[in-house]
Image (cartoon, rainbow, N blue to C red):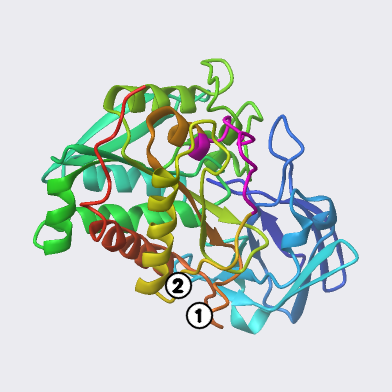
Amino acid sequence: MTPSINAAFDGGNIHFVAVDGQRIDLEIVRDHGSDFYQWFYFRAAGLREGRWTFRIVNAGGSAYPMGWPGYRTRASTDRGAWRQIETRYDDGVLAFDWDGADGDVVWFAYFAPYTTERHASLIARFANAPGFTHRELGRSLDGQPIDLLTVGSGSRPAWIYARQHPGESMCEWLMEGALERLADATDPTTRALLDAFTFHLVPNMNPDGTRRGHLRTNAAGVNLNREWHAPSAERSPEVLGVLSAMDGTGVAYAMDVHGDEAIPANFIAGFEGIPNWTDAQGELFYEFGRRLAAHTPDFQTERGYGKAAAGRANLSMSTNQIAERFGAVAMTLEMPFKDHDLNPDPEFGWSPERSKALAHATLETLATMIDLIPSGGRR
């Protein structure tokens, strides 16, 4: 019996190439209208007979091939628990094995998926929850809503937003954790946060890319995190809607949530190099990182991205644009597709559960800085 390979579902991405004995060759499909690709998510069925080797033969041409060494594929037979399996990368080919005795039908993914349908359930869960309000900030190019959830009554506007790059699914897992924590009004830390801040949360800025199985772009092949200097209805209505809403509220604190392919650690990137940089604004960013690292073993400050030189920040990126535009304490949180090596989990690696826990840790850290963060400026 020849195995069946299928990715014709919400967030799926793979192209079947060939079967040769017990070897199955595959290719990741490029994001529509761009050269980006790395996200994969597919089902394999009919694996009962023997041990199978899956090979993604175009992995070497992906967006971030430096991310494959040390990476381990996620596999699930119930689409609930996503365990790491041993994975090899050699000569541009990513390979992993599956023993049919462990399951005749199995799903493989770059990271535990967070689908469009799960997003819909998330919005249904919190849109009418006590203390929350919901608003659509516009529609994507495919006509999907850009959902905003707001909670809190404080004078400091805080924005947390995720999945500008749709293949970074750990980001919406973190957003689920943030919403759960902010919904717990019985918790004294949460109460302090809701008294000090008004939180604006956008769980998924790129629903089109999510549903299409893209790594990095929207339906037009546009990288949304290079549109913040001049978003348009034609190319990036997702950014246009969010930035317009930010202009209406002002921003005191902002976290843009992402995933990194290569670095096996959680870290934050800042806004060094913006034209209106001040040491006082920058020090609040650095202090947040120091406090978060002291608060949880799932965060560190030693590994991360380089810093832009004075006046050389890329203002098309959201963290730089928001820090410059509003004087906000802005940051990009990066989580790994691999694992947080300083506190590893051999079975699950970095996972949905740990992403949600990190959301709690970031909010707990923010609560310790309430008296340090000023009210947000407006453009």
Q: Is residue 25 visible?
A: yes
Q: Is residue 256 visible?
A: no
What is the C-alpha distance between the residues marked 1 and 2?
6 Å
Q: Dividing the image into 4 quarters, which one contains the N terminus?
A: bottom right
| Earlier sequence position, callout 1 versus callout 2 | 2
Query: Viewed as shown, does residue 125 lie left or right of 256?
Result: left
Q: Which residues are magenta?
A: 306-320
Query: Viewed as shown, does residue 308 lie left or right of 136?
Result: right
In front here: 311 or 201?
311
Query: Residue 64: horizontal and vertical position, in percent?
Result: 74, 53
Asked if marks 1 and 2 touch (Cβ < 8 Å), the reply is yes
Q: Residue at the spot x=60%, y=29% of the render?
A: 219
Query: What residue is disc 2 on?
Result: 298
Q: Residue furthest front?
A: 279
Amino acid type of the residue tagged 1 in the rendering = Asn
Q: Which mark is residue 233?
A: none
Q: Dividing the image into 4 quarters, which one contains the C terminus?
A: top left
Query: Residue 186: horizontal and vertical position, in percent?
Result: 8, 61
Query: Viewed as shown, does residue 197 lie left or right of 119?
Result: left
Mark 2 crowdedness (10 Å alpha carbons): few <14, some 14-19, many ≥20: many
Mark 1 crowdedness (10 Å alpha carbons): few <14, some 14-19, many ≥20: some
Residue 245 against residue 100 in the figure, above or below: above
Q: Quadrant of residue 105?
A: bottom right
Q: Residue at the spot x=26%, y=51% of the render?
A: 372
Amino acid type of the residue tagged 2 in the rendering = Asp
Q: Secondary structure at mark 2?
A: loop
Q: Which mark is residue 343?
A: 1
Q: Residue at the spot x=59%, y=63% of the render?
A: 337
Query: Residue 262: horizontal and vertical position, in percent?
Result: 68, 62
